[in-house]
Image (cartoon, rainbow, N blue to C red):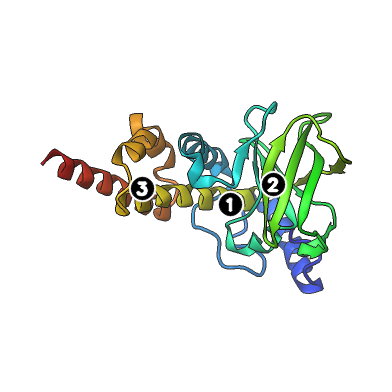
Amino acid sequence: MFSNISRISALAIALCVNACTHVGATPEGTPDGPPGTPGLDGARVGGLFDCFAHLQRRSPESLYWVSPLEGAEGYFITTQFQHQPIRMYSGHEVVIFSKERSTYYWMPGAEHDATGAVALGSYQVEAELPEPGKTVRLRLEKRHPTAFVLVGQGDASAGPTQRIHARKLLDWIINEELHELAHDSLNFQLQWLRSGGSREQVASVMADGAVASSCRNISLRLDTALGLLEDALTATGTQGAR
């Protein structure tokens, strides 16, 4: 991702990476994109992952394009991207990530900067995990120009399997994507309540305070979404008691 965008932007990225290496800072924004979310620096990756992981496990339907990897504890795959500057890579790449590592993969036919030709259809791939020597087999379908669907994992079915190689995804990029995933899931719960959905379903997601404690104090945007959801849960509980 973000390779060979242009000579100017490539130089800007190089200068930014060089500066960050020396001063220990994280880019304030993304190349050719809007400013990054305030406060999301490298130290927040773990907290954001915990917030996301609680929400995904308790409400997988709210993040249907993200799946845990079978046989690779702690790893997830996302088949489309929500952070605005990297949405263009949906339909060309997939990302595998854990709390410690994140990597992106060109799907067969993809090239630099979301170019190349990744046709609609079925793909059977063997993806290298960030841990040396470990791979996972995945079956994906590209049903739309900007999205894949994970349809299977594990043993290969009939047909050829193509190897896809891990490329390191920078922390500040996965930070922003995890932030979007957490916000999307919290907003899903809120909209479910507002549309008359089951309060018990949302209450089970928020039970024991694990989601609230892991998602709070990461960013103003997440705090706002969390506060609106908690207020809606309280309001629907009060109405139900009348």
The answer to whether 71 is drawn above or below residue 83 in the figure is: above
Indicate which disc, 1 or 2, sits on the residue closer to the N terminus: 2
Q: CA distance from mark 1 to mark 2?
A: 10 Å
Pick whichever of labels 3 and 2 is earlier in the sequence: 2
Disc 3 to disc 2, how far (Cα)?
Answer: 26 Å
Q: Which residue is mark 1?
A: 177
In terms of secondary structure, where does tag 2 sit?
A: strand
Which residue type carries mark 2?
Val
Which badge, 1 or 3, comes first in the chain's sequence?
1
Which residue bears the numbered disc 3? 226
Q: Which residue is mark 2?
A: 95
- CA separation, marks 1 and 3? 18 Å
Which dot marks residue 155?
Answer: none
Q: Secondary structure at mark 3?
A: helix
Q: Amino acid at mark 1?
A: Glu
Query: Which residue is at 78% across, 66% downward?
Result: 10
**Residue appearing at x 48%, y 46% in the figure:** 62
Residue drawn at x 81%, y 72% as measured from the top left: 7
Q: Quadrant of the N terminus?
A: bottom right
Tell me if label 3 and label 2 are in contact, CB under 8 Å.
no
In this view of the protein, which residue sits in the foreground, 12 or 213?
Answer: 213
